[in-house]
Image: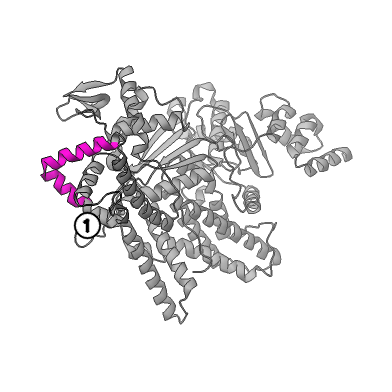
Amino acid sequence: GGALMRLARSARRSASLLLFLGTVGAEAFAPASVSMQRIAGRAAMAVRGRSATQAFVPLLHSQPRTLRNVPGQRPSFCLHMSGGAVAETTSGSSTVYVKHWLEREVREALVRAFGDAVKDALPLVTAATKAEFGDYQCNAAMPLAKTLKSKPRDVAAKLSEELGPLIGDAFEDPEIAGPGFLNLRFKPSYVTDRLAGMARDPTRLGIPKATKPSRVIVDFSSPNIAKEMHVGHLRSTIIGDTLCRLEEFLGHDVLRLNHVGDWGTQFGMLITFLKEKGFGPDTGLADLAVSDLVELYKQAKKRFDDDAEFQDASRREVVALQGGDEMSLKAWKLLCDASRLEFQKIYDILDIKVEERGESFYNPFLGDVIEGLKEKKLYEKSDGAGVVFVDGYTNKEGEPMPLLVQKTDGGFMYSTTDLAAIRHRVSEERAQRVLYVTDAGQSQHFDQVFKVAQAAGWVPEGTSLEHVPFGLVQGEDGKKFATRSGETVKLKDLLDEAVRVSQADMKGRMEEAGTPFGAEEEATARTVGLAAVKYADLSMNRESNYRFSYSKMLALSGNTAPYMLYAYARINGINRKIGEKVDAEGAAIVLEHPSEVALARHLLMLPEILAEVEETLYPHKLCEYLFELSQRFNQFYENCPVSQAETDDLVRSRAALCGVAARAIRLSLDILGIPTVERL
């Protein structure tokens, strides 16, 4: 016994308790320690006969990876101890992705209970819909009852019998509810151990990075040169940035690309018109602002529509530009430079990082796209134009509807550029996942382009091309969001107005309270105003249209940015109040009051919410989590005194819980691209 304890202490000092278990082996525990027998027995069961050394030593040399669910696969080993669960699979391991781990254990339990005939059955594990149902629910018994010709509750009973021992160190015994549901409830020790781990990791809250990062390209924002960014660019810019931040946080290698519209007939048209007006590379073109270019573009477009000779001149200018004519290229570059300056002002306001790679970048590769399609015998002629017929697409008459890739005059299409971009992103950038964040109106276009790229063999197995569509921003009346004159709202004007309204609102409330409104408060109001715009967008299902309302998005209650920021500021107020008196670092977290328990259990769900958003690309899921987190914290704050708690240990415990909640709010807001404020 003494030798065993010395070995245990030595293992702890080297942070290798698993190695200790593996070295001693199941035989060493004998009848003297029932708990040790249980751990060793479970370890042997999990590794299916391999020695404990074989099972546990590899874990010491592995890093946690984002867990991805692979149906039908059994973890290579699974260890539960100290109220925590470690699940290693061929696709990754982590203690924080409990749902994925539970799904694997349910599959194993089903096979043990009913044999290989049910090995492909769905585990049907979901987060519990109500607190009284526990933390997770398993509904696998219901659909299996008919297959097994048994009553659902009988199936649930057998499943529970096998599942309980597999998950027993993290969960209480499964409860059979209703006609055959299993309610799964965390053990208190598991919750407090997880919270302690989150408290020890203030930056990541115990959420692991991927050890095998994917190369992810996000194509977003994409304004047009010589045009001002307008409200239509808001959603792509904000949603795309959030997806980038999430993938970066999870450890993936992210390339943020801005596929600006900087090539095509419109530039020949605009340059021709500018020359007629006396503007050129050396005669005032560099002095034009984007607002000037927008007005000149409108005039050029009208001229192009009405004047055949002007059309011919514009097309000749395009040929000159594509052919590398020095003066044409110089004029084009000046137009691009002027636009970039204005775009960057917007990106600086919104704190957006993105690398420009416009349509012109892919111009040298367009001919290769056509040749590649011809080699694959996908390219056909239709009424003189080059097309590719895509399976599943027909016109109103039921005839095949092709994707146009080349004009009758030999010119190229947007689809050609997008195909060239796919080839470059996959072959040169080595992308494994490419996200295209554009409006829902382009869904058909991208579906066709993706199918053509796949048919041509340009998308390797395991590479994912995904369109991330979003709906329209509407006015409060549900109609097009426009100025009083009917013009599209400029994005800069929209953001400036959000800041103005926020500052006016905060100044009014502070003056009513007799509090001065100074430079610090002005900066805070600016942060709140911009945060409100971002959050209002991200909190909506991205595929839905949403109505833009300054008053609603700046409300201090409800699912709004000010409400989240206020919850964070309130926690900081608690920390300031007790910070000098109480050291909560390393405090043992004790959960007594129901509102403490509810807050703690919700905090544990953050990793799985992030995994869900990464998989589904719906940022509003994170907003929903954040809203509920803020609500649960406010309930905790109302019911559980922190500085005035009954004992010093309880003060430290609640201060530590506040710290984890604050970091979870801050981390979530950071992924949404929203900075926090210390006071509000």
| Residue 130 location (% of width, % of height) | 47, 50
Q: Is residue 109 visible to us here?
A: yes
Q: Tag 1's secondary structure? A: loop
Q: Nearer the viewer, residue 77 or 362?
A: 362
The N terminus, quarter of image: top right
> In the displayed image of the protein, which residue is found farthest to the bottom?
514
- Which picture quadrant has residue 264? top left
> In screen coordinates, is 310 left or right of 290?
left
Q: Residue at x 32, y 53 (%)?
A: 286
Q: Main secondary structure of the magenta part?
A: helix
Magenta stretch in the rendered image: 297-321
> In screen coordinates, is 348 left or right of 17?
left
Was residue 303 drawn as part of the magenta stretch in this picture? yes
**Residue density around tag 1, few if under 14, some if 14–19, many if 20 or more, within 10 Å:** few
| Residue 529 location (% of width, % of height) | 40, 64
Q: Is residue 206 above or below residue 349?
A: above
> In screen coordinates, is 511 left or right of 380?
right
Q: Nearer the viewer, residue 198 or 384?
A: 384
> In the displayed image of the protein, which residue is found farthest to the front?
282
Q: Which residue is mark 1?
A: 487
| Residue 11 location (% of width, % of height) | 79, 40
- Which picture quadrant has residue 453? top left
Amino acid at the residue labelled 1: Glu
